[in-house]
Structures are given as structure tokens and as C-alpha cells.
Image: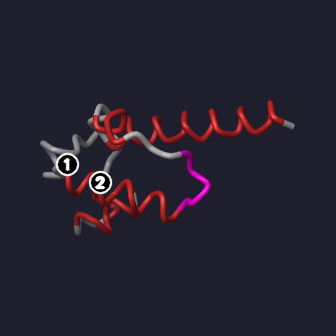
Amino acid sequence: MSVISDKTGYPAEMLEAEMHLEADLGIDSIKRAEIIGAMQDLFPNLPKLSPEELGEQRTIGKISAYLGTKIAEAKKKCLSVV
């Protein structure tokens, strides 16, 4: 929420999981790329995010779930290597 707040100017306490990025927040593809970059900077161990896959996630909640899935996949991959 803080990254979206920072990149859009909307207060974090106003943002809700069911908010649609384009319709509710006016986030276009350029702003979405900025958010992805900020997430990668904030969490450098986060797996590389696919802009195409992330673009399919239309709400804040769906993006959060997508990121959770990617993190879980990366953890599972690391554990299987050990």
C-alpha cells in the first residue's frame, strides 16, 4: 500500500484491496511499471516480476496475492535446492 500511495499520491489509509487500479486509481501502464520498479527496489530478493502477468492483476488485492504466490514459489525453489 505504501508503494502505491507513494507513486499515486493517494493516502495509504484510503487504499483498499478491492480497488481497481485503472478505474479507481487511474494507474496506467507507465505508473504500473514505476510501482513494479519500486517494489523490486524495496524487496531486492523478490523474484523478477512479469509485467504481463502483473498487468492481468486488476486490483490491489490481486496484486498482493500475485506477489505472495511469487514469494512462495521462490521460497519453495530455494528449499528444494538445499
Q: Which residues are magenta?
A: 43-47
Q: Residues within 10 Å of mark 1 (few under 14, many from 20)?
A: few
Magenta run includes residue 36: no
- Extreme-right residue of the structure: 82
Q: Is residue 20 above or below residue 3?
A: above
Tag 1 residue: 29
Q: Is residue 24 above or below residue 79?
A: below
Q: Quadrant of residue 38?
A: bottom left
Report the residue at 34% width, 61% height from top: 13
Q: Nearer the viewer, residue 4 or 47?
A: 47
Chief secondary structure of the magenta portion: loop
Q: Which quarter of the rendering shows the C terminus?
A: top right
Q: Quadrant of residue 73?
A: top right
Q: Secondary structure at mark 1?
A: helix
Q: Nearer the viewer, residue 32 or 60?
A: 32
Q: What amino acid is labelled 1 in the image?
A: Ser
Q: Secondary structure at mark 2?
A: helix
Q: Is residue 48 above or below residue 62?
A: below
Report the residue at 75% width, 39% height from top: 78
Q: Residues within 10 Å of mark 2 (few under 14, many from 20)?
A: some
Report x, y in % for residue 69. 55, 33
Tag 2 residue: 33
